[in-house]
Amino acid sequence: MRSSQDIEQAIDTYGNSVWRVCVLYFRQTPDAQDAFQDTLLKYSLDETIFKEEEHRKAWLLRVATNVCKDMLKAAHRKNLPFEDTLIETTASKNPESNPESDLRDVLEAFCELTDPPRTPLYLALYEGYSAPEISEIIDAPVNTVYSWIARGKQQLREVLS
Amino acid sequence: MSALEDRIHQSFDAVTLPPEVKEATLTYIESKTASQRIPATEQMPEHHLPEPTTNAVPSMSGAEVPTREVSPVPPYDTSAKPIKSRRRKPLIFTRRAGFALAACLLLCAIGVGGFNAYAEETAIVGVDLNPSIELGVNRFNRVVDARAVNDDGQAVLDEVSVIGLSYEEALAKIAGSEAFSTYIYDDSFINITVVCEDTTQSSYLVEQSDKEIESLPYAGACHQMSSEAHHEAQEAGMGMGRYAAAQVLMDLDPSITLEECSAMTMRQMRDRITELDPDNSYAHHGVSHEGTMNGHGQGKGQGKGHRYGRE
């Protein structure tokens, strides 16, 4: 079991990345919070020794994805309008740097995508993972990941245009 | 970074973990694991290594590291008689022996360096029909490695050995092999892709490839590809020609997957591209990829290719 210091450092370093994955799946902030907490609880109980920090991050993202999928399967939840989540998650950020309307458009477009390709597209375009890395994170064939990314880009462009 | 990616980054950069969620999470984990947790003073966080020290200083966990007691060095016993040590006879280097050794070392260095230069791949040529093969070519235009990209390609390499042959000999041997002929039909299309930073060698390889294609009873084309695109093709587990064609096809028809493209012949992909976009440059000339593709269509009904860029 990991120390409190380890857990807190993981949250400080990778909390934003994990949180964004949870937000991708759940438009309701309480559900995203539940998913985030469950992910970090699993991290605290896991004893994997990571050779590199990138492995730690990939592990957290993989677990967050699986936790979110399990929650969706278990509860069959319907998503609330995205505005609620958007207000909650951007409250601490300076809105002057990003016009809120454009922020809404991009995040709404993302959340309107089916999943897949939503998650692999996010991991590719924002987190910068390659298709082979994404295939390990979400446990899917690499060629399928390539297809999802290509299709997701096309769909995202259509929605945003 | 494209404009789309830039927008995505700006948007998601604004999505951050709220401080209250962080605090709630730490409290939640504490409540779930309180009975199992051992005091923090007794454990070390694994991604910090303690600095080696000989003094008592606080460790990362907060506990003091005790100093290590070092026993004093025993005094030298001057009463004991000195032990006579056997001295070896010195090895005398004559000037002649030195020159001979230097000459041997020089010859070894030249041999090793020469071998490295010979074995070094300076170009990679992909051959895609349905079998997909990659040939590693050295600066002397000799094949120094041959790799199968798929099982069909392996069947070809199991039959023919091309290591050590000149590039044109190797290409002719592959195209003329019985294993390769199994996949040849009237409407077959062979794709040869050259990845080479040296323009002189690249031009030579393209020229030799064009000559080989002209001699074949079916259509084909030779293209150039950047090393970055080659790496992407490798990651996708596809031959270079096949990967480039798949990218063009998926752009035209997003419903087609890379897996489906993997199962299509080169001719099928090009025909599908022609159906979707009759004016597409790939269908009639060379494929464009990352702005470094040159097409040289040869064979039945194909014209010379041009350089195209790709967004």
Image: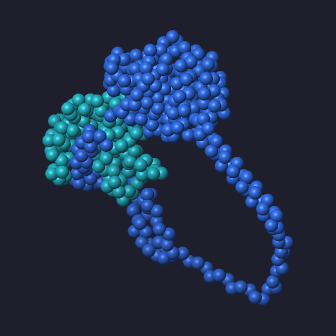
Residue B52 percent coordinates (x, y): 50, 69
Farthest residue in the bottom direction?
Answer: B79
State the blue chain: B
What colouring method underlies this structural image?
Answer: by chain
Is residue A28 among what the camera can see?
A: yes
State the cyan chain: A
Going 38% across and 56% down the picture, which residue do you hit?
A6
Above or below, B99 relative to A30? below
Is residue A32 among what the camera can see?
A: no
Which quadrant holds residue B80? bottom right
Residue B91 percent coordinates (x, y): 82, 69
Farthest residue in the top direction?
Answer: B186
Marker count (numbered): 0
Above or below, B251 relative to A21? above
Going 21% across and 34% down the picture, which residue do you hit?
A160
Of the 4 image quadrants, the one containing the N terminus of chain B is top left
Q: Nearer the viewer, residue B236 or A82?
A: B236
On the picture, is B130 further left or further right than B308?
Answer: right
Of the 4 image quadrants, the one containing the C terminus of chain B is top left
On the picture, is B235 further left or further right than B248?
Answer: right
Residue B269 percent coordinates (x, y): 42, 19
Q: Nearer the viewer, residue B143 or A85?
A: B143
Which quadrant holds residue B2? top left
Q: Nearer the viewer, residue A128 or B93?
A: B93
Above or below, B106 relative to A64? below
Going 85% across and 72% down the picture, which residue do you hit?
B89
Residue B291 percent coordinates (x, y): 38, 35
Q: Nearer the viewer, residue B21 or B228?
A: B228
Going 81% across and 63% down the picture, which residue do you hit?
B97
On the picture, is B306 further left or further right than B209?
Answer: left
